[in-house]
Image (spheres, rainbow, N blue to C red):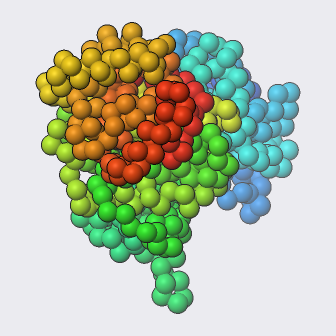
Amino acid sequence: MIPKIILSSGPKATRRTIGYLFGKGRANEHVDPHLVASWNGFAPDPGRSPHRDPKDAMAQLVAPLDQPVRMLGDKAPRDTVWHCPVRAAPEDPILTDAQWADIARRIVAAAGIAPAGDDEACRWVAVRHADDHIHIAATLARQDGRRPERGYDQRAVQREARKIEVDYGLRRLQQGDGTGAKRHSSKEHFKAKRLGQDATSRDLLRLRVRRAVAAASDEAEFFALLEATGVTVRLKLGPSGDALGCNFALPEDTNDKAEPVFYAGSTLAPDLSLPKIRKSFAVTSSAPIAARPGDPWHQATAAAERIPHHLIRGDDPTAQGQLVALGTTLDILAITAPAAVRAELGKAALAFERATRSRIAADLNSTRVLRRSVQAILRERPASRDGATFTMLVDTVLTAVVFAMHWHRTRQHAQQEAGAEQALVHLQIAYGQIAEPVLESLAQRAPSPQMQQRIARHVQQAAPDHAERILNDPAWDALTTVLAEAEAVGHNAATVLDQALGQRPLDDAHSPARALTWRVRRLGERHAPSPRAQAANARSAAQAHGAPVIPAAVAPPLPRAPSHRR
Protein backbone atom coordinates (compact mmCIF):
# COMPACT_ATOMS: atom_id res chain seq x y z
CA MET A 1 0.00 0.00 0.00
CA ILE A 2 1.50 3.28 -1.13
CA PRO A 3 0.45 6.59 0.48
CA LYS A 4 1.90 9.83 -0.90
CA ILE A 5 1.46 13.31 0.60
CA ILE A 6 0.93 16.36 -1.63
CA LEU A 7 0.57 19.91 -0.27
CA SER A 8 -1.33 22.72 -2.06
CA SER A 9 -1.49 26.45 -1.46
CA GLY A 10 -3.47 29.42 -2.69
CA PRO A 11 -6.95 30.83 -2.03
CA LYS A 12 -8.63 28.24 -4.28
CA ALA A 13 -6.55 25.19 -3.26
CA THR A 14 -9.48 23.36 -1.64
CA ARG A 15 -11.79 24.02 -4.58
CA ARG A 16 -9.15 22.79 -7.05
CA THR A 17 -8.51 19.63 -5.06
CA ILE A 18 -12.20 18.73 -4.60
CA GLY A 19 -12.87 19.58 -8.24
CA TYR A 20 -10.16 17.14 -9.31
CA LEU A 21 -11.29 14.39 -6.92
CA PHE A 22 -14.90 14.46 -8.16
CA GLY A 23 -14.07 15.26 -11.77
CA LYS A 24 -13.42 12.93 -14.70
CA GLY A 25 -9.66 12.90 -14.21
CA ARG A 26 -6.97 13.95 -16.65
CA ALA A 27 -7.53 10.85 -18.80
CA ASN A 28 -11.16 10.09 -17.87
CA GLU A 29 -9.82 7.59 -15.37
CA HIS A 30 -12.16 8.57 -12.51
CA VAL A 31 -15.03 6.11 -12.43
CA ASP A 32 -17.81 6.61 -9.86
CA PRO A 33 -15.92 8.96 -7.49
CA HIS A 34 -17.74 9.02 -4.16
CA LEU A 35 -17.18 9.76 -0.49
CA VAL A 36 -16.29 6.84 1.78
CA ALA A 37 -15.46 8.80 4.96
CA SER A 38 -15.28 12.34 6.33
CA TRP A 39 -14.40 14.24 9.50
CA ASN A 40 -17.99 14.18 10.79
CA GLY A 41 -19.44 11.16 8.99
CA PHE A 42 -22.17 13.11 7.16
CA ALA A 43 -20.39 15.55 4.83
CA PRO A 44 -22.16 16.15 1.48
CA ASP A 45 -21.15 13.72 -1.26
CA PRO A 46 -20.98 15.34 -4.74
CA GLY A 47 -20.46 11.91 -6.25
CA ARG A 48 -23.75 10.52 -4.98
CA SER A 49 -26.02 13.55 -5.42
CA PRO A 50 -27.77 12.88 -8.77
CA HIS A 51 -30.54 15.43 -8.21
CA ARG A 52 -28.22 18.40 -7.67
CA ASP A 53 -25.92 20.32 -9.97
CA PRO A 54 -22.40 18.84 -9.47
CA LYS A 55 -20.89 22.31 -9.05
CA ASP A 56 -23.38 23.20 -6.32
CA ALA A 57 -22.73 19.89 -4.54
CA MET A 58 -18.97 20.46 -4.63
CA ALA A 59 -19.40 24.02 -3.35
CA GLN A 60 -21.43 22.67 -0.39
CA LEU A 61 -18.49 20.37 0.45
CA VAL A 62 -15.72 22.95 -0.11
CA ALA A 63 -17.33 25.57 2.17
CA PRO A 64 -17.20 23.59 5.45
CA LEU A 65 -13.77 22.16 4.61
CA ASP A 66 -12.43 25.68 4.09
CA GLN A 67 -14.13 27.28 7.09
CA PRO A 68 -11.32 26.70 9.67
CA VAL A 69 -8.76 28.11 7.22
CA ARG A 70 -10.84 31.23 6.51
CA MET A 71 -11.25 31.86 10.23
CA LEU A 72 -7.46 32.19 10.57
CA GLY A 73 -7.32 34.98 8.01
CA ASP A 74 -3.76 36.27 7.60
CA LYS A 75 -2.54 33.70 10.12
CA ALA A 76 -3.50 30.80 7.86
CA PRO A 77 -0.61 28.51 6.85
CA ARG A 78 1.00 28.87 3.44
CA ASP A 79 -0.01 25.34 2.48
CA THR A 80 -3.70 24.94 3.17
CA VAL A 81 -4.56 21.55 1.66
CA TRP A 82 -3.11 18.15 2.59
CA HIS A 83 -3.79 15.59 -0.14
CA CYS A 84 -2.84 11.92 0.27
CA PRO A 85 -3.61 9.30 -2.41
CA VAL A 86 -3.49 5.75 -0.98
CA ARG A 87 -3.15 2.92 -3.48
CA ALA A 88 -3.26 -0.86 -3.03
CA ALA A 89 -1.17 -3.28 -5.11
CA PRO A 90 -2.76 -4.83 -8.25
CA GLU A 91 -2.72 -8.30 -6.67
CA ASP A 92 -4.41 -7.15 -3.43
CA PRO A 93 -8.03 -8.13 -2.71
CA ILE A 94 -10.68 -5.52 -3.51
CA LEU A 95 -11.59 -3.69 -0.33
CA THR A 96 -15.08 -2.47 0.57
CA ASP A 97 -15.99 1.18 1.12
CA ALA A 98 -16.14 0.51 4.86
CA GLN A 99 -12.62 -0.94 4.82
CA TRP A 100 -11.28 2.03 2.88
CA ALA A 101 -13.04 4.32 5.37
CA ASP A 102 -11.22 2.61 8.24
CA ILE A 103 -7.91 2.95 6.37
CA ALA A 104 -8.55 6.65 5.78
CA ARG A 105 -9.21 7.25 9.51
CA ARG A 106 -6.00 5.44 10.43
CA ILE A 107 -3.98 7.47 7.92
CA VAL A 108 -5.24 10.89 9.06
CA ALA A 109 -4.74 9.87 12.71
CA ALA A 110 -1.16 8.75 12.07
CA ALA A 111 -0.38 11.96 10.18
CA GLY A 112 -1.63 14.18 13.00
CA ILE A 113 -4.43 15.54 10.80
CA ALA A 114 -7.23 14.02 12.86
CA PRO A 115 -6.05 12.03 15.90
CA ALA A 116 -8.60 9.49 17.16
CA GLY A 117 -11.09 11.03 19.58
CA ASP A 118 -10.04 14.63 18.80
CA ASP A 119 -13.28 16.49 18.01
CA GLU A 120 -11.42 19.73 17.22
CA ALA A 121 -9.08 18.23 14.62
CA CYS A 122 -8.79 19.18 10.95
CA ARG A 123 -11.64 18.58 8.55
CA TRP A 124 -11.05 15.93 5.90
CA VAL A 125 -12.73 13.68 3.36
CA ALA A 126 -11.81 10.39 1.67
CA VAL A 127 -12.89 9.89 -1.95
CA ARG A 128 -12.79 6.54 -3.73
CA HIS A 129 -12.04 6.61 -7.46
CA ALA A 130 -11.61 2.94 -8.25
CA ASP A 131 -11.29 -0.49 -6.67
CA ASP A 132 -7.64 -0.02 -5.79
CA HIS A 133 -7.29 3.47 -4.29
CA ILE A 134 -8.70 6.43 -2.42
CA HIS A 135 -7.71 10.09 -2.07
CA ILE A 136 -7.74 11.82 1.32
CA ALA A 137 -8.02 15.61 1.32
CA ALA A 138 -7.82 17.78 4.45
CA THR A 139 -7.50 21.48 5.21
CA LEU A 140 -4.55 22.37 7.43
CA ALA A 141 -6.32 24.33 10.14
CA ARG A 142 -7.89 22.71 13.19
CA GLN A 143 -11.43 23.62 14.20
CA ASP A 144 -10.10 25.17 17.42
CA GLY A 145 -7.96 27.61 15.40
CA ARG A 146 -4.63 25.87 15.89
CA ARG A 147 -2.46 24.19 13.30
CA PRO A 148 -2.14 20.41 13.27
CA GLU A 149 1.00 18.78 14.66
CA ARG A 150 2.10 16.83 11.65
CA GLY A 151 5.87 16.70 11.97
CA TYR A 152 7.38 13.88 9.88
CA ASP A 153 3.90 12.96 8.67
CA GLN A 154 5.25 11.15 5.60
CA ARG A 155 7.21 8.71 7.78
CA ALA A 156 4.29 8.28 10.17
CA VAL A 157 1.90 7.55 7.32
CA GLN A 158 4.32 5.00 5.82
CA ARG A 159 4.65 3.23 9.16
CA GLU A 160 0.87 3.05 9.49
CA ALA A 161 0.59 1.73 5.93
CA ARG A 162 2.90 -1.16 6.85
CA LYS A 163 0.57 -2.02 9.77
CA ILE A 164 -2.51 -1.75 7.54
CA GLU A 165 -0.94 -4.21 5.09
CA VAL A 166 -0.59 -6.75 7.87
CA ASP A 167 -4.09 -6.20 9.26
CA TYR A 168 -5.81 -6.47 5.87
CA GLY A 169 -3.62 -9.18 4.35
CA LEU A 170 -2.29 -6.87 1.62
CA ARG A 171 1.03 -7.03 -0.20
CA ARG A 172 3.68 -6.01 2.32
CA LEU A 173 6.11 -3.36 1.11
CA GLN A 174 9.56 -2.82 2.56
CA GLN A 175 10.13 -0.08 5.12
CA GLY A 176 12.20 2.72 3.58
CA ASP A 177 15.07 4.67 5.09
CA GLY A 178 14.72 7.94 3.20
CA THR A 179 17.49 7.19 0.69
CA GLY A 180 15.29 6.11 -2.21
CA ALA A 181 14.85 8.14 -5.37
CA LYS A 182 11.81 10.37 -5.54
CA ARG A 183 8.90 8.65 -7.26
CA HIS A 184 7.17 10.25 -10.20
CA SER A 185 3.78 11.85 -9.63
CA SER A 186 0.53 10.80 -11.26
CA LYS A 187 0.68 14.03 -13.27
CA GLU A 188 4.08 13.01 -14.65
CA HIS A 189 2.74 9.51 -15.39
CA PHE A 190 -0.17 10.75 -17.50
CA LYS A 191 2.04 13.29 -19.24
CA ALA A 192 4.40 10.48 -20.26
CA LYS A 193 1.44 8.60 -21.74
CA ARG A 194 0.43 11.67 -23.75
CA LEU A 195 3.99 12.03 -25.03
CA GLY A 196 4.12 8.35 -25.97
CA GLN A 197 6.99 7.64 -23.57
CA ASP A 198 7.47 4.24 -21.94
CA ALA A 199 8.64 5.97 -18.74
CA THR A 200 8.23 9.40 -17.18
CA SER A 201 10.71 12.17 -17.93
CA ARG A 202 11.96 11.92 -14.34
CA ASP A 203 12.75 8.22 -14.73
CA LEU A 204 14.31 8.65 -18.17
CA LEU A 205 16.53 11.47 -16.91
CA ARG A 206 17.59 9.46 -13.87
CA LEU A 207 18.65 6.59 -16.11
CA ARG A 208 20.55 8.78 -18.59
CA VAL A 209 22.31 10.82 -15.91
CA ARG A 210 23.32 7.69 -13.99
CA ARG A 211 24.76 6.11 -17.12
CA ALA A 212 26.62 9.28 -18.01
CA VAL A 213 28.16 9.32 -14.52
CA ALA A 214 29.15 5.68 -14.92
CA ALA A 215 30.73 6.22 -18.34
CA ALA A 216 32.48 9.57 -17.80
CA SER A 217 35.92 10.01 -16.29
CA ASP A 218 35.54 13.73 -15.57
CA GLU A 219 32.98 16.53 -15.50
CA ALA A 220 33.58 17.69 -19.09
CA GLU A 221 33.04 14.20 -20.46
CA PHE A 222 29.93 13.83 -18.29
CA PHE A 223 28.29 16.90 -19.83
CA ALA A 224 29.34 15.81 -23.33
CA LEU A 225 27.72 12.41 -22.85
CA LEU A 226 24.51 14.01 -21.63
CA GLU A 227 24.38 16.22 -24.71
CA ALA A 228 24.97 13.18 -26.91
CA THR A 229 22.01 11.39 -25.33
CA GLY A 230 19.66 14.33 -25.79
CA VAL A 231 19.66 15.73 -22.26
CA THR A 232 19.57 19.51 -21.79
CA VAL A 233 21.68 20.77 -18.88
CA ARG A 234 21.22 24.07 -17.05
CA LEU A 235 23.90 25.02 -14.54
CA LYS A 236 23.22 26.87 -11.33
CA LEU A 237 25.99 29.44 -10.97
CA GLY A 238 27.24 31.08 -7.80
CA PRO A 239 28.39 34.72 -7.42
CA SER A 240 31.89 33.67 -8.48
CA GLY A 241 30.59 32.13 -11.68
CA ASP A 242 31.35 28.60 -10.54
CA ALA A 243 28.71 25.91 -11.09
CA LEU A 244 27.04 24.99 -7.80
CA GLY A 245 24.43 22.63 -9.17
CA CYS A 246 22.77 21.47 -12.36
CA ASN A 247 19.29 20.78 -13.63
CA PHE A 248 18.36 18.36 -16.39
CA ALA A 249 15.57 18.29 -18.96
CA LEU A 250 14.39 16.39 -22.02
CA PRO A 251 13.75 18.67 -25.02
CA GLU A 252 10.38 17.07 -25.76
CA ASP A 253 9.13 17.55 -22.16
CA THR A 254 7.83 21.13 -21.99
CA ASN A 255 5.37 23.18 -19.94
CA ASP A 256 2.41 25.19 -21.20
CA LYS A 257 4.84 27.95 -22.29
CA ALA A 258 6.81 25.49 -24.46
CA GLU A 259 9.74 25.73 -22.03
CA PRO A 260 11.72 22.62 -21.00
CA VAL A 261 10.75 21.14 -17.63
CA PHE A 262 13.96 20.91 -15.58
CA TYR A 263 14.67 18.53 -12.71
CA ALA A 264 17.41 19.15 -10.17
CA GLY A 265 19.87 16.28 -9.96
CA SER A 266 19.18 15.82 -6.24
CA THR A 267 15.45 15.33 -6.98
CA LEU A 268 16.24 12.58 -9.51
CA ALA A 269 18.23 10.64 -6.91
CA PRO A 270 20.15 11.57 -3.76
CA ASP A 271 23.49 10.69 -5.38
CA LEU A 272 22.93 12.72 -8.57
CA SER A 273 23.50 16.20 -7.20
CA LEU A 274 26.46 17.97 -8.81
CA PRO A 275 28.61 17.91 -5.62
CA LYS A 276 28.15 14.13 -5.28
CA ILE A 277 28.79 13.55 -8.98
CA ARG A 278 32.00 15.56 -8.66
CA LYS A 279 33.01 13.50 -5.67
CA SER A 280 32.74 10.29 -7.69
CA PHE A 281 34.87 11.83 -10.47
CA ALA A 282 37.48 12.96 -7.95
CA VAL A 283 37.86 9.41 -6.67
CA THR A 284 38.23 8.04 -10.19
CA SER A 285 40.65 10.64 -11.52
CA SER A 286 42.73 11.70 -8.49
CA ALA A 287 45.60 9.88 -6.79
CA PRO A 288 46.90 8.11 -9.91
CA ILE A 289 47.50 4.41 -9.60
CA ALA A 290 50.04 2.48 -11.59
CA ALA A 291 48.45 1.61 -14.90
CA ARG A 292 48.75 -2.06 -15.69
CA PRO A 293 48.47 -3.00 -19.35
CA GLY A 294 45.86 -5.56 -20.14
CA ASP A 295 42.32 -6.23 -21.19
CA PRO A 296 39.93 -3.94 -19.25
CA TRP A 297 37.36 -6.77 -19.25
CA HIS A 298 39.80 -8.96 -17.33
CA GLN A 299 40.74 -6.10 -15.02
CA ALA A 300 37.09 -5.33 -14.29
CA THR A 301 36.39 -9.01 -13.66
CA ALA A 302 39.34 -9.29 -11.28
CA ALA A 303 38.22 -6.16 -9.39
CA ALA A 304 34.62 -7.38 -9.23
CA GLU A 305 35.86 -10.69 -7.81
CA ARG A 306 37.08 -8.76 -4.77
CA ILE A 307 33.68 -7.26 -3.97
CA PRO A 308 32.54 -10.23 -1.80
CA HIS A 309 35.81 -9.96 0.14
CA HIS A 310 35.14 -6.26 0.84
CA LEU A 311 31.52 -6.95 1.81
CA ILE A 312 32.53 -9.64 4.27
CA ARG A 313 35.76 -8.28 5.73
CA GLY A 314 35.73 -4.55 5.03
CA ASP A 315 34.18 -1.84 7.16
CA ASP A 316 30.72 -0.56 6.27
CA PRO A 317 31.82 2.61 4.39
CA THR A 318 34.18 0.54 2.21
CA ALA A 319 31.48 -2.04 1.57
CA GLN A 320 28.99 0.69 0.66
CA GLY A 321 31.53 2.10 -1.79
CA GLN A 322 31.86 -1.32 -3.40
CA LEU A 323 28.09 -1.44 -3.88
CA VAL A 324 28.19 1.93 -5.65
CA ALA A 325 30.92 0.61 -7.96
CA LEU A 326 28.92 -2.58 -8.54
CA GLY A 327 25.95 -0.47 -9.60
CA THR A 328 28.22 1.42 -12.02
CA THR A 329 29.38 -1.89 -13.47
CA LEU A 330 25.79 -2.99 -14.04
CA ASP A 331 25.06 0.32 -15.79
CA ILE A 332 27.99 -0.25 -18.17
CA LEU A 333 27.02 -3.89 -18.78
CA ALA A 334 23.54 -2.75 -19.75
CA ILE A 335 25.05 -0.39 -22.34
CA THR A 336 27.60 -2.83 -23.80
CA ALA A 337 25.45 -5.98 -23.68
CA PRO A 338 24.50 -7.97 -26.78
CA ALA A 339 21.08 -6.95 -28.07
CA ALA A 340 19.49 -10.22 -26.93
CA VAL A 341 20.12 -9.52 -23.23
CA ARG A 342 20.33 -5.73 -23.16
CA ALA A 343 16.78 -5.33 -21.84
CA GLU A 344 17.26 -7.82 -18.98
CA LEU A 345 20.57 -6.27 -17.94
CA GLY A 346 18.96 -2.83 -18.11
CA LYS A 347 16.26 -4.03 -15.72
CA ALA A 348 18.93 -5.50 -13.44
CA ALA A 349 20.78 -2.18 -13.36
CA LEU A 350 17.58 -0.26 -12.59
CA ALA A 351 16.64 -2.65 -9.78
CA PHE A 352 20.12 -2.67 -8.25
CA GLU A 353 20.21 1.14 -8.25
CA ARG A 354 18.19 0.99 -5.02
CA ALA A 355 20.82 -1.28 -3.46
CA THR A 356 23.59 1.28 -4.05
CA ARG A 357 22.23 3.81 -1.53
CA SER A 358 21.79 3.57 2.22
CA ARG A 359 22.37 5.70 5.30
CA ILE A 360 26.01 4.52 5.32
CA ALA A 361 28.35 7.03 3.68
CA ALA A 362 30.29 5.36 0.87
CA ASP A 363 34.09 5.29 0.87
CA LEU A 364 35.01 5.03 -2.82
CA ASN A 365 38.79 4.87 -2.43
CA SER A 366 38.93 1.09 -2.96
CA THR A 367 36.84 1.25 -6.14
CA ARG A 368 39.23 3.07 -8.49
CA VAL A 369 40.36 0.00 -10.42
CA LEU A 370 36.84 -1.28 -11.03
CA ARG A 371 35.46 2.12 -12.01
CA ARG A 372 38.35 2.88 -14.37
CA SER A 373 38.13 -0.57 -15.90
CA VAL A 374 34.42 -0.34 -16.72
CA GLN A 375 34.95 3.15 -18.16
CA ALA A 376 37.75 1.76 -20.33
CA ILE A 377 35.43 -1.03 -21.46
CA LEU A 378 32.97 1.52 -22.77
CA ARG A 379 35.58 3.68 -24.50
CA GLU A 380 38.24 1.28 -25.73
CA ARG A 381 37.63 -2.42 -26.07
CA PRO A 382 34.78 -4.63 -27.27
CA ALA A 383 34.24 -7.99 -25.62
CA SER A 384 35.82 -11.11 -27.13
CA ARG A 385 34.12 -12.47 -30.22
CA ASP A 386 33.06 -15.68 -28.51
CA GLY A 387 31.37 -13.71 -25.73
CA ALA A 388 33.45 -15.38 -23.01
CA THR A 389 34.89 -12.19 -21.49
CA PHE A 390 31.43 -10.60 -21.28
CA THR A 391 29.95 -13.77 -19.78
CA MET A 392 32.74 -14.00 -17.20
CA LEU A 393 32.11 -10.45 -16.01
CA VAL A 394 28.36 -11.09 -15.78
CA ASP A 395 29.10 -14.27 -13.81
CA THR A 396 31.32 -12.35 -11.39
CA VAL A 397 28.79 -9.53 -11.03
CA LEU A 398 26.03 -12.08 -10.40
CA THR A 399 28.01 -13.54 -7.50
CA ALA A 400 28.70 -10.05 -6.13
CA VAL A 401 24.97 -9.22 -6.22
CA VAL A 402 24.26 -12.33 -4.13
CA PHE A 403 26.72 -11.11 -1.50
CA ALA A 404 25.27 -7.59 -1.72
CA MET A 405 21.80 -8.97 -0.99
CA HIS A 406 23.16 -10.83 2.02
CA TRP A 407 25.07 -7.73 3.23
CA HIS A 408 21.92 -5.61 3.17
CA ARG A 409 19.91 -8.36 4.86
CA THR A 410 22.28 -8.55 7.82
CA ARG A 411 21.92 -4.78 8.28
CA GLN A 412 18.12 -4.84 7.91
CA HIS A 413 18.17 -2.67 4.77
CA ALA A 414 14.86 -4.02 3.53
CA GLN A 415 14.42 -1.94 0.37
CA GLN A 416 18.05 -2.35 -0.64
CA GLU A 417 17.86 -6.11 -0.15
CA ALA A 418 14.70 -6.24 -2.25
CA GLY A 419 16.41 -4.22 -5.00
CA ALA A 420 19.38 -6.60 -5.07
CA GLU A 421 17.04 -9.59 -5.15
CA GLN A 422 15.12 -8.16 -8.12
CA ALA A 423 18.40 -7.45 -9.91
CA LEU A 424 19.48 -11.04 -9.30
CA VAL A 425 16.40 -12.41 -11.08
CA HIS A 426 17.12 -10.37 -14.21
CA LEU A 427 20.83 -11.23 -14.08
CA GLN A 428 20.07 -14.94 -13.90
CA ILE A 429 17.84 -14.70 -16.98
CA ALA A 430 20.51 -12.79 -18.94
CA TYR A 431 23.27 -15.10 -17.75
CA GLY A 432 21.39 -18.19 -18.89
CA GLN A 433 20.91 -16.71 -22.35
CA ILE A 434 24.55 -15.76 -22.92
CA ALA A 435 26.36 -18.58 -21.09
CA GLU A 436 24.99 -21.57 -22.97
CA PRO A 437 26.26 -20.57 -26.45
CA VAL A 438 29.71 -19.82 -25.03
CA LEU A 439 29.86 -23.16 -23.22
CA GLU A 440 28.77 -25.01 -26.35
CA SER A 441 31.53 -23.30 -28.34
CA LEU A 442 34.12 -24.27 -25.72
CA ALA A 443 32.86 -27.85 -25.61
CA GLN A 444 33.42 -28.21 -29.36
CA ARG A 445 37.14 -27.58 -28.76
CA ALA A 446 37.49 -30.21 -26.01
CA PRO A 447 41.01 -31.73 -25.72
CA SER A 448 42.01 -35.32 -26.37
CA PRO A 449 40.50 -38.16 -24.29
CA GLN A 450 43.93 -38.74 -22.72
CA MET A 451 44.09 -35.19 -21.37
CA GLN A 452 40.47 -35.35 -20.21
CA GLN A 453 41.33 -38.52 -18.27
CA ARG A 454 44.32 -36.78 -16.68
CA ILE A 455 42.15 -33.83 -15.65
CA ALA A 456 39.46 -36.19 -14.33
CA ARG A 457 42.01 -37.98 -12.11
CA HIS A 458 43.13 -34.69 -10.65
CA VAL A 459 39.54 -33.62 -10.01
CA GLN A 460 38.94 -36.87 -8.12
CA GLN A 461 42.04 -36.24 -5.99
CA ALA A 462 41.58 -32.49 -5.44
CA ALA A 463 37.78 -32.36 -4.96
CA PRO A 464 36.57 -35.82 -3.96
CA ASP A 465 33.31 -34.46 -2.49
CA HIS A 466 32.34 -32.83 -5.80
CA ALA A 467 34.13 -35.04 -8.33
CA GLU A 468 31.09 -37.05 -9.42
CA ARG A 469 28.98 -33.93 -10.00
CA ILE A 470 31.80 -32.20 -11.91
CA LEU A 471 32.55 -35.19 -14.15
CA ASN A 472 28.86 -35.71 -14.98
CA ASP A 473 28.14 -32.01 -15.47
CA PRO A 474 27.09 -30.98 -19.04
CA ALA A 475 29.78 -28.27 -18.84
CA TRP A 476 32.58 -30.82 -18.27
CA ASP A 477 33.89 -30.61 -21.85
CA ALA A 478 34.00 -26.80 -21.62
CA LEU A 479 36.00 -27.07 -18.38
CA THR A 480 38.56 -29.39 -19.96
CA THR A 481 38.90 -26.98 -22.91
CA VAL A 482 39.81 -23.98 -20.76
CA LEU A 483 42.24 -26.10 -18.73
CA ALA A 484 43.91 -27.26 -21.92
CA GLU A 485 44.09 -23.68 -23.22
CA ALA A 486 45.61 -22.52 -19.91
CA GLU A 487 48.25 -25.20 -20.16
CA ALA A 488 48.98 -24.24 -23.77
CA VAL A 489 50.02 -20.71 -22.69
CA GLY A 490 52.33 -21.90 -19.93
CA HIS A 491 50.15 -22.61 -16.91
CA ASN A 492 50.09 -25.90 -15.05
CA ALA A 493 46.54 -27.23 -15.52
CA ALA A 494 46.48 -28.94 -12.12
CA THR A 495 47.69 -25.80 -10.34
CA VAL A 496 45.12 -23.62 -12.08
CA LEU A 497 42.35 -26.09 -11.23
CA ASP A 498 43.48 -26.12 -7.58
CA GLN A 499 43.36 -22.33 -7.51
CA ALA A 500 39.86 -22.34 -9.02
CA LEU A 501 38.66 -24.90 -6.47
CA GLY A 502 40.10 -22.80 -3.63
CA GLN A 503 38.36 -19.56 -4.58
CA ARG A 504 34.91 -20.43 -3.22
CA PRO A 505 33.03 -23.57 -2.16
CA LEU A 506 31.03 -25.39 -4.81
CA ASP A 507 28.32 -26.57 -2.43
CA ASP A 508 25.76 -24.05 -3.68
CA ALA A 509 26.70 -24.19 -7.38
CA HIS A 510 23.95 -25.60 -9.59
CA SER A 511 26.56 -26.44 -12.24
CA PRO A 512 29.98 -26.92 -10.57
CA ALA A 513 31.79 -27.51 -13.88
CA ARG A 514 30.35 -24.30 -15.30
CA ALA A 515 31.39 -22.32 -12.21
CA LEU A 516 34.91 -23.79 -12.50
CA THR A 517 35.04 -23.05 -16.22
CA TRP A 518 34.75 -19.30 -15.66
CA ARG A 519 37.22 -19.36 -12.78
CA VAL A 520 39.78 -21.31 -14.81
CA ARG A 521 39.24 -19.07 -17.86
CA ARG A 522 39.97 -15.97 -15.76
CA LEU A 523 43.01 -17.55 -14.14
CA GLY A 524 44.28 -18.94 -17.44
CA GLU A 525 44.13 -15.57 -19.17
CA ARG A 526 46.37 -13.97 -16.59
CA HIS A 527 50.09 -13.95 -17.23
CA ALA A 528 51.51 -17.46 -17.03
CA PRO A 529 54.06 -18.00 -14.23
CA SER A 530 57.74 -18.05 -15.10
CA PRO A 531 59.60 -21.41 -15.17
CA ARG A 532 61.23 -20.52 -11.84
CA ALA A 533 57.82 -19.84 -10.26
CA GLN A 534 56.46 -23.06 -11.69
CA ALA A 535 59.40 -24.97 -10.18
CA ALA A 536 58.81 -23.32 -6.80
CA ASN A 537 55.14 -24.29 -6.93
CA ALA A 538 56.10 -27.85 -7.78
CA ARG A 539 58.49 -28.02 -4.79
CA SER A 540 55.83 -26.62 -2.48
CA ALA A 541 53.37 -29.21 -3.73
CA ALA A 542 55.87 -31.99 -3.13
CA GLN A 543 56.57 -30.77 0.40
CA ALA A 544 52.85 -30.83 1.08
CA HIS A 545 52.81 -34.55 0.19
CA GLY A 546 50.61 -34.05 -2.79
CA ALA A 547 48.00 -31.82 -1.12
CA PRO A 548 46.59 -29.07 -3.36
CA VAL A 549 48.46 -25.81 -2.79
CA ILE A 550 46.74 -22.44 -3.10
CA PRO A 551 49.26 -19.64 -3.74
CA ALA A 552 49.34 -16.78 -1.23
CA ALA A 553 48.11 -14.39 -3.90
CA VAL A 554 44.79 -16.18 -3.94
CA ALA A 555 42.40 -15.07 -1.22
CA PRO A 556 41.24 -17.78 1.22
CA PRO A 557 37.77 -19.15 0.60
CA LEU A 558 35.03 -16.68 1.44
CA PRO A 559 32.14 -17.56 3.76
CA ARG A 560 29.16 -18.82 1.84
CA ALA A 561 26.33 -16.51 0.89
CA PRO A 562 22.81 -17.46 -0.19
CA SER A 563 22.90 -19.52 -3.38
CA HIS A 564 22.19 -17.94 -6.73
CA ARG A 565 21.96 -21.44 -8.25
CA ARG A 566 24.50 -21.12 -11.03
Occupied quadrant, residue 26:
top left
Query: Residue at horizontal 54%, vertical 41%?
Result: 555
Relative side of 545 to 226, left or right: right
Is any part of residue 380 visible from this angle?
Answer: yes
Query: Residue at horizontal 49%, vertical 26%?
Result: 546
Relative side of 382 to 52, left or right: left
Work out whether 346 lies above or below 363. above
Is any part of residue 175 visible from this angle?
Answer: no
Relative side of 335 to 91, left or right: left
In the rendered image, residue 539, in percent from the top left (x then y), is placed at 47, 40
Quarter of the image containing the C terminus?
top left
Work out whether 266 lies above or below 386. below
Query: Residue at horizontal 54%, vertical 88%?
Result: 239
In the rendered image, residue 351, in percent from the top left (x then y), is placed at 44, 37
Query: Residue at horizontal 37%, vertical 63%?
Result: 292
User: Which of 266/117 is in front?
Assistant: 266
Quarter of the image containing the N terminus?
top right
User: Which of 412/320 is in front?
Assistant: 320
User: Which of 16/173 is in front?
Assistant: 173
Relative side of 428 to 40, left or right: left
Occupied quadrant, residue 495:
top left
In the rendered image, residue 215, in percent from the top left (x then y), is placed at 34, 59
